[in-house]
Amino acid sequence: MQDMAIELSGLSFAWPKQSPILQIDHFALPRGERLFLQGPSGCGKSTLLNLVGGVLTPLQGEIRLLGQPLAANSARQRDRMRADHVGFIFQSFNLLPYLSLEENVMLPCRFSRLRAERARAQYGSERDAARILLAALELDEPALQGRSVCDLSVGQQQRVAAARALIGSPEIIIADEPTSALDSDARQIFIDLLIRECDATGSTLLFVSHDRSLQQAFDRSLLLTEVNRARGGESC
Amino acid sequence: MLISLAWHSLWNRRSSVLLTVLAISISVMLLLGVEKVRVEARSSFANTISGTDLVVGARSGQVQLLLYSVFRIGDATNNISWQSYQEIAGHRNVAWTIPLALGDSHRGFRVLGTNQDYFRHYRYGAERQLSFAEGQPFDDLYDVVLGAEVAQKLGYKLGQQLVIAHGMGNTSFAEHKDKPFRVVGILARTGTPVDSTLHVSLEAIEAIHLDWRAGVPIPGAKVDAEKARALDLQPKQITAFMVGLKSKIATFHLQRAINNYRAEPLSAILPGVALQQLWQMIGIAEQALLVISGFVVLTGLIGMLTVLLSSLNERRREMAILRSVGARPWQIIALLTLETTVLTLLGCLVGTLLLYAALLLAQPWIEQLFGLHIAISALSSYQLQLLGLVAVAGILVGVVPGYRAYRNSLADGLTIRL
């Protein structure tokens, strides 16, 4: 069990007074794997992410992150698990407009001591870690220094978000439709860079998208509807 | 960490933040300003008369006696005889007296009959003596000395002639037209009722009433202004008088003696005590003012709440991002509460600075216009308490958007449904 990054068993979730939106008998993501999870929008994807992130708790069943049961923990411990071990990339508007590029990237270190320590151990300081990650994601042009994050292109913003998810080497990276706002060239560049950096940090990647054409770059791909027995999910 | 986030977030919204801080600081300035003016008005009120140990008049309540003798408001119940006045003035503990004869007016301003002792012994504020802006005390029978306000409002200059009306009222039909007065002196501004008074000698009051009885001219008994000079102008009655004692220890003794005076019913009052009593009566107005400015502060805080709550919807994504990187729900509350705290404290600080700037600018103007001298001093402990109260209220207000954001972020989780 130790080598599973995410493991769900007997999971079911429903919003109050609604039929279940998620029912998953078993789902396991081994450590270090890059999984492409495909599903049309509105079938419980974001609910699943909130469950794995520990923001929602399932009605039944068990979620294990890195071998530890999540649901049994208190809200505080779940917040801690998320801060320490999971990096998120969302569809768009990932960044805080009032922080600089580097500060946006360093944000997880403010909430997780573990990731701050790892960043320091690896690169000397959190700021150096942010700088090196930004450089690795090809965001080290001097022109970008001191610019507001709002001035960046969407593709650049998504790469900053990726750097933020990767800082402090969390074991799990969850990317929720991170490329849907990008054009096809930027899309491919983003995915290549993300996978390369996940390899470098050894992070497990759960990449969620409705766009089947992206799946070649991943170790494995899975249809959410294959594992989700719930018929509902008209709206997620 | 949260502090720097809150600061950056506020800086990012600086234009609306600036307006919010401005609204709070103006309300804080108003609150502190009203309190300041209240305290100064009170002390200026208490400074109307000083150095006088007793005010003596016909028997009446002490507030009424104070009102007509010092503030020149209302009328005396009765006069007191010259004889009683002389007797008390000759008492061994009495250092000086100032006789006051009231009852006439000039275009709405009171005319006071008195003597040279008025200019010598009358004190106001911190034992300040009356001083002349122009001219000198009255000397001739038909000389008049104007208070600063009278001279300014009516535009009178030295040497100008004026006529005194019988009784009060702006357009009195009964005027002492036959005996015009000449302006010989104008007093410097004091910020007291002295400014709105015309001063003549007791003899002049006597002279203009020679041919009058019971408020009307005696038919056919015209006494020429020049002929009046030859007559006996010793007053028979005065309205009241002020007493200065050689030793304060004798105050209560003499007061009791006057109150038990056998020849006629008199009242002697301690001006300080009567002022205190009077202030308590009009103190309700000052309280009302303070309450109103309290509501202004409340308005400022509600304005802040409005701005923060309305920006909350736009900031749901910000909260979701913070949650995704591991922020705990209480940290979301803390972040927003911290913002209102920063806003409130900034508002308090700027408001205080604005108050002092305004005081510096308005001080000479207020003194000129209302005769109210506002001392610029450090915040009083009561003002500090008010500031503290505003700060606490502001921080409590911050809990509301904090709680809303907390609820939002629980509902939104890591995704935003907008």
Image (tube, coloured by chain):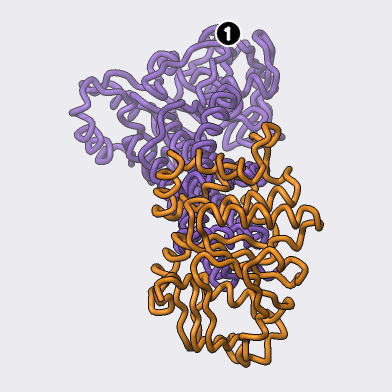
Chain colours: A orange, B purple
Whether residue B76 appears in this view of the structure is no
Query: Residue at horizontal 57%, vertical 70%?
Result: B413
The quarter of the displayed image where residue A44 is located: bottom right
Q: Secondary structure at mark 1?
A: strand
Height in image: A172 above or below B367? Answer: below
| For residue B173, side relative to residue B120 (left or right) | right
Q: Which residue is mark 1?
A: B134
Residue B370 picture location, percent across and down: 57, 30
The quarter of the displayed image where residue A166 is located: bottom right
Residue B366 picture location, percent across and down: 58, 28
The one nearer the camera, B19 or B116, is B19
Residue B278 picture location, percent across and down: 42, 44
Residue A82 picture location, percent across and down: 47, 65
Whether residue B342 appears in this view of the structure is yes
| For residue B268, side relative to residue A198 (left or right) | left
The one nearer the camera, B54 or A41, is A41
Q: Quadrant of the C terminus of chain B?
A: bottom right
Label 1 amino acid?
Glu
Query: Residue at horizontal 67%, vertical 41%?
Result: A148
The one nearer the camera, B379 or B148, is B379
Mark 1 surroundings within 10 Å by alpha-carbon count, few (fewer than 14), some (14 through 19), many (20 or more): some
